[in-house]
Amino acid sequence: MKHSFKVYLLLIIALSLNGCLRGVPQYHVKPSEAFIPITAADISFADDLDTDSLELAIERSINYYDNAGRDKVYHVADRLVTSRQLKETLAEFRTILRQTVNKAELNKKIAAEFNVYRVAGTGGNSNALFTGYYEPLLEGSLERTEKYKYPLYRVPPDIIKKANQIGRIKDGKFVPYYSRREIDVEGVLQGKNLELVWVSDPVELFSLHIQGSGKIKLENGNILTVGFAQTNGRPFRSVTKFMLENGKIKDSEASYRHEFLRGKSDQEIYDVLSHNERYTFFRFLDNEPVGSLGEPVTPGRTIATDPDYFPEGALAFIRLRKPVFDENGKIKERVDFSRFVLNQDKGSAIMGPGRVDLFCGFGIEAENTAGTLKENGELYLLLKK
């Protein structure tokens, strides 16, 4: 009888598992001690931006959960959180946001309805490290001219993704794809009809590679939007660190590193830029640049984190300092600020818990902010109870 019962039980389990196989969730985010539960009542949830931009960012995350991100499950502290719960968090927060008339009431409702976790940095550091990225504007042409001679390339047809590697086939063997020097200096991709557009400044083009998306203004006034399509799979290396270590700039000049390269010859420029072997390939975008979720990024509201640690699309709250500039674009002071943000992007240099890149938007002010933002601050994750 016991034997028959065991067989029957195993049969039920097998049938149950078989019926659920198609619904097995995709587990994401490494189990981590980076999420520390805190008392929400101890935080002042002040926001320095407009509500419309916040609602727009929320809508984009909800759209992600309704589509590509609908089956994912994440580890947060000692619990598993589904994309459905993350969507419910956003829906509840949006309702509260629309019904709340002042900050005190908002603080009270968040404390009542949400669990809040502080995200610790690497190595036991309680603070997160914040940097910024932006959408550059370059001058360009759809045809190569003496002024516009630095190309943006589309994804080459010989690039291959194999497991977690990117490369190409050479003599029947899988090898790393061409480096930045091989592409920009040796011209290995020239004459293959891979150019999307040409621009006038190699240093600004390098910034576009780092930022991942931007706008190209043509001579007739039309503006094209380009976005990330693929990389060559090579390692990312900091050009700023390279310049500091080689005495080309001082610590105080690190935020204005591009100024050192302006006016230099192409050879001098590429000797520096080629230190970063990673190369970005682009595509034209019909609308706004999109983040890693496939949704448009929102200026001031989108953050990029390491998707191995932080739930994609999730609602977060940040507190840190931002630079304030004078009329010449130089920093005159740094002031405290805080705001709600959505985790909607990732970056090759954004690795580990407590590492955050804030999307600063488009234009000169965004460029100045992103280029000078390197602050320790606080990162919080909000989840509906």
Image: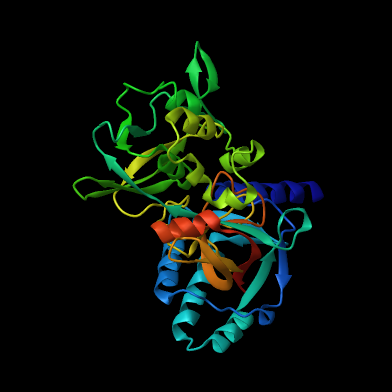
> Looking at this rendering, what residue extends furthest in the top direction?
171
Residue 63 seen in this snapshot: no
Badge count:
0
- The residue most toward the right is 2
Residue at image x 44%, y 21%?
A: 186
Q: How is the image coloured?
A: rainbow
- From the viewer's side, name the closer residue of 182 and 158: 182
Q: Is residue 91 above or below residue 271?
A: below
In the image, residue 282 sits, relative to residue 165, either above or below, namely below
Quarter of the image for the C terminus: give it: bottom right
What residue is at 44 percent from the left and 59 percent from the top? 366
Instruction: Measuring from the top left, give residue 146's x and y in whole percent.
Output: 27, 31
- Percent across and percent down for residue 262 are 44, 41
Where is residue 87? Give x, y as percent.
50, 66
- x and y percent of residue 326 in the render? 47, 66
In the visual, does 317 lie left or right of 141? Answer: right
Is residue 263 or residue 284 the one in the foreground?
263
The answer to whether any part of residue 131 appears in the image is: yes
* Residue 338 sits in quarter: bottom right
- Residue at 55% in and 84% down: 106
